[in-house]
Amino acid sequence: MNTDIKLNQLWGWSGTVSRKPFIIWAALLFGLKYNLDRVLLRWLFDRDWSVFSYFQQPFPGIQNLSPAQSPSEFLALLAISLPFLWMGVMLSIKRLRSAKLPLWFALLFVIPVLKWFLFVALALAPERGAAGERPRLAAAWLPNAVLSSAALAVGASVLLGAGAAVLATNVLGSYGWALFVGVPFSMGFFAALIHGAREPRRVEESILVALLSVVICGAVFLVLAFEGIICLIMAAPIALVLAFIGALAGHAVQVSRQPRVPAQMLCVAVLAIPLMLGSDAVSTGPAPSLKVVTAIEVNAPVETVWKHVIEFTELAPPKELLFKLGIAFPIRAEIRGTGPGAVRNCNFSTGPFVEPIEIWEAPRLLKFTVTSNPPPLQEWTPYHAIYPRHLKGFLVSEQGQFKLTPLPNGWTCLEGTTWYRHTMWPVFYWQLWSDYIIHKIHTRVLLHVKALAEAEQGRTGHE
């Protein structure tokens, strides 16, 4: 295998690159890219650029820029990023071709966190010679029988996932891309690879051991009081999908190397997980501010609705399954004082939200900050109570408001808004859950206010 360093290895589609040139080129390009970005960002934006900024973003430096806001800076950074993106993908494809691995693995290069998994795999994968040539080192110590192989694959993957979760949450305090994307992908890859290390397995078998690994790992968390069932249910869709994709990747490796998988490949997930978790912990930026708005129409004038917005009586026990499962729900609201500076307490099933009033424009607008947040849910668990780290400070309501708008027919449009942050990634996935939960909380409060206001309006109308 040719280990020479050649400039044309960076551009062309054809050919192969062995491990040594790949690692050298990766180090050189990383150093060059970092210094170019550092100089450019200081010159154009007058801001510093950290080496840790690369660990999550496929296009470092441009993620917070809008072409409409600063077109020249955006285009300059994009122009610098694209050649490096091309060279990285080309090197990855040639390294994959050299190791006789599926070329579609190069897609991982542009996926946050998983690109570090790809780098470890390409740095470890041995070269393969002519077609049909067996790898020199095979995992002969692994069991051959189907059930024994599957049991070992599931058990080892569960240990890998459990250890990674403890490291991420209890040691690094991170609920990020690495935990929810990198770990389940690695578990699926690891399980499928072990199961097919001695004998080729069907793709259905590879997928089954991967999904079983994630399910059993979740059950272990529940039994050991590490996590509650509600959060496990929320995490299950993304974890199962990523484990499924990881299983396909692991199966593709075993198929490409029939009849045996080299032992080096079994180390990929074990080595990649600490790298992914570490990079995630040092590079996770501030959580974005999110907003949820819910509106209903009330058959009462704004003056009547306003009285029940600032303070309302105790709500009936919830009928919604979501709240019965343990999600925190509002019970009543109390207020001390009037006008800006008054303090409103919105009592939930898990404790009070403390809400100092910022804007009091009776009877149109009530806006407040939130200075104290109770836990967002009460976990279902076989034990009396558990308090995973994410229950405190990982979902934070920052501001809220009620806006009342008179309608031509004498009714009122009552609108509730919450601004909040959550430090769980990928944001777009967890936002699906958090937006839905907050919308249901809004709806519970607004419907209660609607019932109170319309009942008062009905009494007034009959007097």
Image (tube, grey):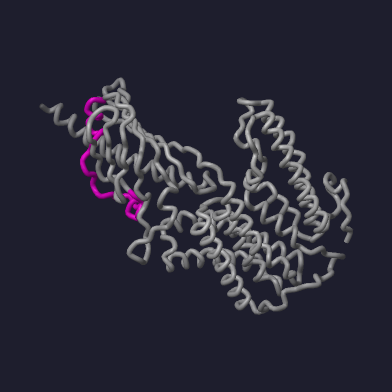
| Depicted 1 relative to depicted 56: above or below | below
Is residue 192 part of the magenta span, yes or no? no
Q: Is residue 347 left or right of residue 146?
A: left
Residue 405, image x, y percentages: 32, 24
Quadrant of the rendered image containing residue 37? top right
| Depicted 153 relative to depicted 446: above or below | below
Residue 277, image x, y percentages: 59, 55
**Residue at horizontal 88%, vertical 61%?**
1
**Residue at horizontal 72%, vertical 77%?**
140
User: Which residue is more in the foreground, 117 or 21?
Assistant: 21
**Residue at horizontal 30%, vertical 49%?**
351
Residue 200, image x, y percentages: 71, 71
Q: Is residue 358 left or right of residue 458?
A: right
Residue furthest left in the image: 463
Read off the magenta span.
302-328
- Quarter occupied by the C terminus: top left
Is residue 326 part of the magenta span, yes or no? yes
Residue 304, image x, y percentages: 22, 28
Quadrant of the rendered image containing residue 266? bottom right
User: Which residue is more in the foreground, 408 or 254?
Assistant: 254
Quadrant of the rendered image containing residue 305? top left
